Image (cartoon, grey):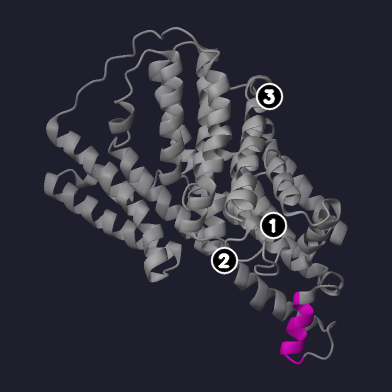
């Protein structure tokens, strides 16, 4: 059963990676994969739990004399492990749902156009730098997926040539992933590490913002040297009336302030991040609905209606994939993988972390980070302590490593779908830049930890 679980997991991942070829939504595959993994775990529980340290500890704590007792094993899996992992998964999912709803409210009111309408330059080089810097910081506040969608959509209004637009889109992917890596709310992986108590908001920002910036600046500098001349004049922007302008400004600034309040509440009141998120969402929801009731257009612009446009399949995808990874953790697969990585890299923190980052360009970084959280015990060593070197490196590597291939991140997949970017084209023109930036940022991270802040 141990080997069968690996085979099922690999096949499920292949189906997710080949989503567009198979015409099967990855959310459906992930949900089936998550359920199948737990079914296999329950069926083969006796053999799988035999060498499980957590199960042995459970038997000792609950005075279970026979570790092969079928009823006790079922009780452990269903009432202990599954509920424990469901609680951890739910925290992440509710946080994401709240953040996506706030972003959807801003987008519904065209709040993001306040930012995009400010971009009027015709210089190819200046435009590349502007888009990249805006993407980098916007991704840290919102998330890399939403930021990529907004910025790539903007490209259609600014750049007519398809391949030139692909070049800009490639840099946007790199900037979005780099920007999400140093912020506790900028990427799903950093959200998971932050919510799980592996990193703190202040520390991850302080230690990762420079390496993340380096991972973007190096490719940006190289790429900008290849761009010369000016673009055709951008399309004129249609002005909106003053009341609508005030509403979009309110939604943008209030929405961003709401998202920024979440780490503040976490740091000052020690509230779980999802609790802060549902608090600011409820307040934003209340104010938005009151404004539209007052304007008389509540039916068209209510938050309830906006909720129908939230990307629910993405939430369900994370539910399925995190559930599958939880099964691998409970069955002992992840602990064995941890030992394999330790042996392969001689327990070197940087070797293991960077290897996971490169893998994230092939395999989705969400299960990789979830797996790493299950493979290594928090506090087992100095590098694995709260805000330890490994967890910070993992946040950086998993976030920026996904840029190496276009299918390695949600931002890349979104840009690929919006602009129909070819996999081979990205591999030829962008992947090597992402790889250079990835290792440059990692070197910067090492210098900060080993030389400057010893």
The residue closer to the viewer here, 301 or 57, is: 57
Q: Is residue 231 left or right of residue 177?
A: left
The residue closer to the viewer here, 268 or 443, is: 443
Q: Position of residue 88 (x, y in %)?
A: 57, 66
Q: Which residue is mark 1?
A: 371
Q: Which residue is mark 2?
A: 88
Q: Position of residue 423 (x, y in %)?
A: 66, 24
Q: Which residue is mark 3?
A: 427
Residue 442 is one of the magenta-drawn residues? no
Q: Position of residue 251 (x, y in %)?
A: 26, 44
Mark toward the start of the polypeptide (3 vs 1): 1
- The residue range painted magenta reads 54-63
Look at the image and tell me whether residue 23 can be seen: no
Mark toward the start of the polypeptide (1 vs 2): 2
Element on which disc 1 rests: helix
Q: Which quarter of the picture shows residue 320?
A: bottom right
Q: Is residue 157 above or below residue 328?
A: above
Image quadrant holding the C terminus, namely bottom right
Residue 58 is one of the magenta-drawn residues? yes
Image quadrant holding the N terminus, namely bottom right
| Image point (76%, 60%), residue name | 334
Q: Are marks 1 and 2 in contact (CB under 8 Å)?
A: no
| Image point (18%, 47%), residue name | 292
Q: Is residue 309 above or below residue 121?
A: below
Q: How many marks?
A: 3
């Amino acid at each position: 059963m141990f080997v069968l679980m690996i085979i099922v997991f690999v096949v499920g991942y292949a189906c997710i990676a080949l989503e567009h070829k198979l015409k099967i939504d990855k959310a459906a595959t992930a949900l089936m994969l998550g359920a199948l993994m737990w079914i296999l775990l329950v069926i083969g529980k006796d053999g799988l739990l035999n060498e499980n340290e957590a199960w042995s500890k459970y038997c000792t704590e609950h005075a279970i004399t026979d570790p092969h007792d079928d009823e006790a094993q079922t009780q452990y899996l269903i009432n202990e492990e599954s509920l424990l992992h469901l609680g951890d998964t739910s925290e992440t999912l509710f946080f994401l749902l709240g953040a996506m709803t706030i972003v959807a409210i801003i987008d519904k009111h065209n709040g993001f156009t306040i930012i995009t309408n400010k971009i009027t330059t015709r210089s190819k080089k200046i435009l590349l730098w502007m888009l990249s810097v805006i993407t980098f910081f916007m991704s840290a506040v919102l998330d890399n997926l939403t930021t990529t969608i907004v910025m790539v959509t903007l490209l259609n209004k600014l750049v007519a040539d398809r391949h030139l637009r692909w070049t800009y889109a490639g840099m946007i992917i790199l900037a979005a992933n780099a920007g999400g890596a140093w912020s506790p709310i900028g990427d799903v992986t950093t959200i998971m590490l932050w919510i799980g108590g592996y990193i703190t908001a202040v520390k991850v920002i302080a230690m990762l913002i420079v390496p993340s910036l380096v991972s973007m600046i190096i490719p940006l500098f190289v790429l900008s040297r290849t761009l010369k001349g000016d673009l055709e004049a951008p399309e004129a922007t249609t002005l909106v009336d003053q009341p609508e302008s005030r509403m979009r400004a309110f939604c943008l600034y209030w929405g961003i302030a709401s998202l920024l309040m979440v780490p503040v509440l976490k740091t000052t009141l020690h509230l779980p991040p999802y609790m802060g998120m549902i608090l600011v969402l409820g307040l934003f929801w209340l104010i938005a609905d009151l404004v539209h009731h007052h304007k008389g257009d509540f039916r068209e612009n209510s938050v309830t209606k906006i909720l129908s446009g939230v990307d629910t399949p993405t939430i369900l995808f994370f539910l399925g994939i995190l559930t599958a990874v939880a099964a691998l953790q409970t069955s002992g697969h992840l602990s064995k993988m941890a030992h394999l990585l330790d042996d392969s890299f001689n327990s070197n923190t940087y070797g293991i972390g960077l290897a996971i980052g490169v893998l994230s360009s092939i395999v989705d970084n969400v299960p990789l980070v979830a797996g790493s959280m299950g493979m290594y015990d928090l506090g087992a060593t100095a590098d694995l302590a709260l805000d330890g070197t490994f967890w910070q490196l993992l946040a950086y590597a998993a976030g920026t490593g996904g840029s190496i291939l276009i299918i390695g991140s949600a931002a890349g997949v979104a840009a690929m779908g919006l602009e129909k970017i070819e996999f081979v084209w990205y591999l030829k023109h962008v992947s090597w830049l992402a790889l250079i930036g990835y290792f440059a940022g990692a070197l910067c991270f090492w210098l900060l930890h080993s030389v400057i802040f010893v």
